[in-house]
Image: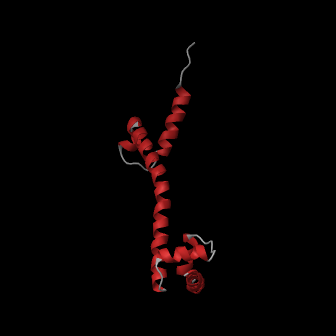
C-alpha cells in the first residue's frame, strides 16, 4: 500500500497558516501567496534586527553629542577623553545618564575634561 501525506501535509499547512495570522486577504488565505509573504517577512525581520542595533547606536550618539555640546565639548573630544580617562561606559549607558542623571553625567564630563587637559 502506498503512503499518503495527509496528516503531515495538514500539519505543515496549519503551521504556515498560524504564522500568517494577521495578514490581509490572499496573503493569509492562499497557500502559495502566503508562503511568498512569509519568506519576505522573514527576510525583512532578519535585516531589521540588525538595522535596529544601528539605529539605536545613532540615537545614542546624537543624544550624547547634544549633551556634550551643552557642557562645552564635542562628541569626538568626549569619546577621546573617555578613553584617556579610562572610563569604560558604553554609549547607551552614557546616553541614559545624560537624560536621567545629569549630575552624574556632569561628573563624567568633568573627568573627561581633566584627562584632556592633562594630555594636552
Q: Quadrant of residue 86?
A: bottom right
Instruction: Identify the image quadrant of the C terminus.
Output: bottom right
Residue occupying image coordinates x 59% and y 81%: 115
- Residue 73 in percent (x, y) is at 48, 82
Residue at the outermost front position: 120
Residue occupying image coordinates x 55% and y 14%: 2
Q: Quadrant of residue 3?
A: top right
On screen, residue 40 above or below 107: above
Image coloring type: secondary structure
- Residue 28 in percent (x, y) is at 41, 43
Residue 90 in sight here: yes
On screen, residue 74 above or below 10: below
Residue occupying image coordinates x 41% and y 40%: 34
Residue closer to the observer: 78 or 93: 78
Left or right: residue 114 compared with residue 21: right
- Residue 17 in percent (x, y) is at 47, 41
Instruction: Identify the image quadrant of the N terminus.
Output: top right
Residue occupying image coordinates x 63% and y 71%: 88
Residue 95 in sight here: no
On screen, residue 94 above or below 55: below
Amino acid at each position: 500500500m502506498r503512503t499518503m501525506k495527509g496528516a503531515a501535509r495538514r500539519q505543515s499547512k496549519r503551521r504556515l497558516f498560524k504564522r500568517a495570522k494577521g495578514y490581509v486577504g490572499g496573503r493569509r488565505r492562499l497557500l502559495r501567496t502566503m508562503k511568498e509573504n512569509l519568506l519576505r517577512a522573514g527576510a525583512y525581520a532578519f535585516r531589521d534586527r540588525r538595522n535596529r542595533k544601528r539605529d539605536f547606536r545613532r540615537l545614542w550618539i546624537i543624544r550624547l553629542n547634544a549633551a556634550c555640546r551643552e557642557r562645552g565639548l564635542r562628541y569626538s573630544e568626549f569619546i577621546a577623553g573617555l578613553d584617556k580617562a579610562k572610563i569604560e561606559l558604553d554609549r547607551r549607558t552614557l546616553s541614559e545618564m545624560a537624560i536621567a542623571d545629569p549630575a552624574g553625567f556632569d561628573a563624567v564630563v568633568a573627568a573627561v575634561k581633566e584627562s584632556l587637559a592633562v594630555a594636552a
